[in-house]
Image (spheres, coloured by chain):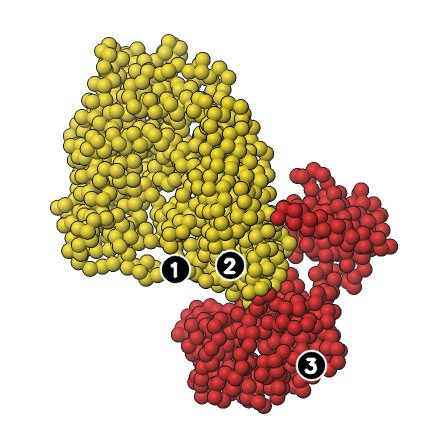
Amino acid sequence: MRFTSIKSAACLVVVGSLLTFHSTARADVSFLKDVAPLLLKKCTGCHGEKSNQGGYRAHTFQYLMKPAASGLRPVVPGKPAESTLYRLVASSISTVRMPKYDDALSAPQIELIRKWIVEGAHYDGPDQAMLLRLAIGPRKQPPAPATYTTAVPVFAVALAPGGKSVAVAGYHEVLIYSAQGVLLRRIGGLPQRIQSLSFSADGATLLTAGGSPGEYGEADVIHLSGAAKPEPLGTYLDVALTAVYDKTEQKIAVGSADGGVSVYSAASLKRQWVSNLHSDWVTAVSFSQDGRFVASASKDMTVKLHNAQDGTLYTTYTGHNKQLGQYRGQDPVYSVRFSSATDTAASAGGGKWIQLWNPEKTKEEAGSAADMEERFMKQGHTKYLPHGFTRPVLATVLSDNRLFAASADGQVKEFDIAEMKEVQTFAGHHDWVCTVDFDRASGLLATGSSDGEVKLWESKTGQCLHSFFARPTGPTGPAR
Amino acid sequence: MRYNSCFARVGAALLFGTLACAPSVAAPVRNASGIVKISVYPQKLLLSSKRDVRQLIVTGTYADGRTTDLTHAAEVQTSKPAVARSIPGAGIVAAVGDGAASITVVAAGKSVTMPVMVSNTSRPDPVSFKFETMAILTKQGCSTGSCHGSPHGKGGFQLSLFGYDPATDRTALTRDGYSRRINTLEPADSLMIKKPSLQLPHVGGKRLRKEDVGYGLLTRWISEGANTDLPAVECTGIKIYPQGEQLLAPGHNSQQLSVIASYSDGTERDVTAIAAFETSSAASVTVNPAGLAESHGKGQVAVSVRYLEHLQSVHFTSVEPIAGFDAKWKEPAIESVIDRLVNERLKTLTYLPSALCTDSEYLRRVSLDITGLLPGAEKARAFMADKSPDKREKLVDALLGSEEYARFWALQRADLMRVTPARLKGDRAKKFYAWITDAVRTNMGYDRYAHEIITASGDSDKTPQACYFVAIPTMEERTEMTAELFMGSRIECAHCHNHPFENWTQKDYYRIGAVFARTQEKNGVVSAADSGESTHPSTGEVMKPYGLTTAAHTDPSTDRRVAFADWLVKPSNPYFARVAVNRIWASLFGRGIVDPIDDFRSSNPAANGGLLAALASKFEKTGYDCKAMIRGICLSNAYQRSAAPSVIPEGEITLFSRASIRLLTAEQLKDAVAVASGSLQAVPDENSRDLYATERSFPENSGFTRAFGQPERLTSCASERQSGPTLIQALEVLNGPQFYGMARNGAGKLAAIGEDAALDNIYLSALCRYPTTVERATARKFLARPGDKSEHLTDLLWTVLNTREFLFQH
């Protein structure tokens, strides 16, 4: 056993040095490709957006070059010996050396920084004030594993219009299954986990949102005809949790765990606006039927309504964070949907109710600080539909008045929001149900749970038609 | 299944790879030559699963009987490598395949052979969430109170404190936040691995390294699908080897520990690698994650070993010989078992005791300790003149026979039981204090005293001891106060979660609660109801009263408190006598043998465990006789030592090598000022008694006594009495009406008796001694200045009252 581990350690060293040789052998060290990833991994935790120890930050190129509290220049182009950044990472004095709370950089890593400075410390990015995490652009994603050693949680399912197939979130890929549960296609080149899937009305395009927890988010547009190569829409500081089209499919909205909401042109894939008003993860976004508003649900217990044109705040819905009254509770919101039949929005998450409300009336009731006392006394226009789940609602889908909700207690239920009543329960999952989708044309319902199981249901009868674990055993899709 | 076994092998390689690296600490210096024998723990090995390992402890014995730990120096050979293998340099044997083999341990030229049986290696052996993952989260520090174990977690990730609630933690780890913390396909890429290993920014710093056992186990657990099943089997306890107090000395400056957990299904498992180790003083003894304790300097240290909710401590005494110490050590005269045990400890840890104190020091000290009052000039003069050899005995006996003793020690007891009109209406506070005073005066056995209080029923106006329950109306207060008073334990933590530093669980808390669940109090009348239960807040389970063992005690028609009190005061109860004698000791030495006095726990070692045990046993044998205990301590050499430190090396106060120096308590000081200035006579009579702060039923709550830390008696905590110095104290002493007013008052009387007599009087009454020649000359010069004589005397008296010699007990 000892021999094996020594051997593999030796292998790692060899591979490591080969990689280094490769990168340093280039004529120029690329800041974005070589230096920035190193800074992000080893420095920006203490010298970054949230913390500026020693009065120094390195999360943008602009900041990286700015002297710290000491006044010493961190980078003097061409002169590593005068560059504090280099001197500190290369120091042999343990009390001085950076990173202070981690092991020292490896010799090849230190050499990389030295070489970049010697070569003039050039910036090869778009904008010197841009966050390095965004400036380095979409990551090159590894191929999905040919076979999964364990099932992975199914965070997203989407029924293709007509219900002939269902797209299921996989690991670095999307898995397309037939309505009978046969794996038809694997679309790779995607981030590690996929949190959201959404088809265009014609079924030709698929929107995905996903990323690597705590470090990276990415939303993609996939044209399913041909090679189905994902086109990155944008990257984010944490996992992208949701991506949806508006009704006319001219815009795409993305919400991410860094608290941001971004809206893109569906035609050009250019970003039109970004909003960072939430103080916690944006868990779901939805366009109103008339296209005027983008609603974003968040763990910060609010739903925010943005004007879809420019991203300005229209109003904030606070019904999930009430200290007083019959419907009090402080709960994260995991889902928001607009009814196709009325102007009603339905939001849900923790708490006992699915909340049904209207954007204009919400704004009217929001009022000003002056009438706060009065507002506390008023009940407001919201209708509270008790859902009866024992754990939070994680996802909903709304079609006309039919609302399907998936819960962490393992159940899925259908409600009629016009009649304000529960219609039926879809029981059978053995773990948290993370996602639900409904296809109006076929009447099919698809659900996915944390243990990796996907279920397809006949929504009329509540009968489960097919169950399968989204755990491929076949050949893998192409890497990007 | 294929993926399972594949990962199992990778995991095993990781685990064993790390174990092999773990003891890479510098090999302790040892002299293998004089070793005459080696022994190995355990004597036979049963390995019952694929990943089973066993930490051996190899002990070498020198010709003179001293021992040393040879675990890491020993070579461990296996007769059949296909059955069991050893991890070099670690003293660990690991399972390979089913079968029997023998293990030979070679160290210091000696060898021991023992059998090993290995079974079940072909069965899957997945990482257990409940018994391994949870232990690792504690070991790496994730679930401590300052990190994710805090009531609101950290950074949106919350764990239960030291993993007391696995059912909640499994959701936090594997489900919350869209399962973002685990990645079963690429375990090392999981957030819960990348953050603590600083592959991503982590506010808590680097908590996990690839070479840690925890890294291998956590990634293996994740790769196996992060299974969080919670089997009904429970861990019932841990066993640590070696047992008992460990002496670390040159030639034996390190000790490997072994930790074996037992489970309710009858199995055992070696959890040394996944238990958490913590030292109470890293300056003396450190302990590494593999359980190797190493000495770095002299001192007494508790190394606490935590596995799941089980916590035990190993006590180490680390000694450093000092050249020439033995020559300097003069075997002190031994008066009693106290001196034998105190001296033994001092000699082991190479501290020299201070010399014995003078008569005047002794008189002042023992009077303040037993009666709370200064003896007065007359008594001081007489004591110094007395030539009889047993005058200290006679003094102690006289003091213990005084009413002042009864009142002053009753005051100390009353402080902890909320004897205050704020809690006890009408005359109840006064009556309860009178009852306590009576118990002290008549020397009521401490067992009966505790029993009467805990089982008190009836109208508290007529049965004053029932005031105990009137002052603390809730089940929680009764639980906490009883545990603190009579069991020396602060169990408040266990109200909401298992105690973080002791074996007190939430269950224990509500079991003590169950004792008082039927004790009701209405309009000052205490009675036992025939219904009422205490239920565990998270399981809803109805708790069985604490401490009940016999069937008779579970009879529903009897008062549960009686059964509990019977259990509590029975000789050999683990808490009662120890806690009581420690309180007495602390009153007399200014510091408990266990300190703080209400913080008995294995991770807070006694300064002298043998001494505490001997005193407790003596206390039990004498029928819990408090006076005899006080007498014995006050007449020991340990008590009679000077407060001045011995020269080399400096005396260690915590080992009782010298008397402690402490500020007089608020009540002592107030009375001392009055007595020294002659405003109050040294011995109170029945008419003046209420004027003495040390004699009162309940706190007077004056600005003066509050400034010097008199408690309001609103908690049962001994630390409610503040002993730290404050600015207000300095102002009171320098400018306060108490000091100056009394001094002026006293000066008037002194002016009449002549200068020399006045000087003697001032020094004798304030300091129990005559002024020195220099002091006398200086004072005379001062008094000879022109001006008002009585003003000069006032100033002189005030000056003496402001000396540290007066303000402090020494």
| Chain at tag 3 | A
| Chain at tag 1 | B
Asked where in the image residue A424 lies, by quadrant, the reply is bottom left
Give the letter of the red chain: A
Label 3 sits on residue: A205
Residue B149, horizontal then vertical, whole percent: 48, 53
- In space, the residues marked 3 and 1 are separated at their CA atoms by 50 Å
Q: Kindly give the residue lying farthest to the right in the view shown.
A: A27
Label 2 sits on residue: B124
Label 1 sits on residue: B232
Q: Quadrant of the C terminus of chain B?
A: top left
Q: Can see residue B401? A: yes
- In space, the residues marked 2 and 3 are separated at their CA atoms by 45 Å
Residue type at tag 2? Pro
| Mark identifier at residue A304 | none
Please, what secondary structure does the residue beneath circle 1 have? loop
Q: Please tell me which of labels 2 and 1 falls first in the chain.
A: 2
Task: Establish whether labels 2 and 1 are both on one chain.
Answer: yes
| Chain at tag 2 | B
Residue B542, horizontal then vertical, whole percent: 28, 59
Instruction: Give the number of the mark in front: 2 or 1.
Output: 2
Q: Is residue B630 above or below residue B194?
A: above
Of residue B252 and residue B692, the one placed in the foreground of this image is B252
Residue drawn at x 15%, y 32% as measured from the top left: B442
Of residue B703 and residue B578, the one placed in the foreground of this image is B578
Residue B798, horizontal then vertical, whole percent: 35, 23
Asked where in the image residue A252 lies, by quadrant, the reply is bottom right
Residue type at tag 3? Thr
Position of B408 compared to A312: left or right? left
Give the letter of the yellow chain: B
Disc 1 residue crowd, few under 14, some 14–19, many 20+, Cα 10 Å: few
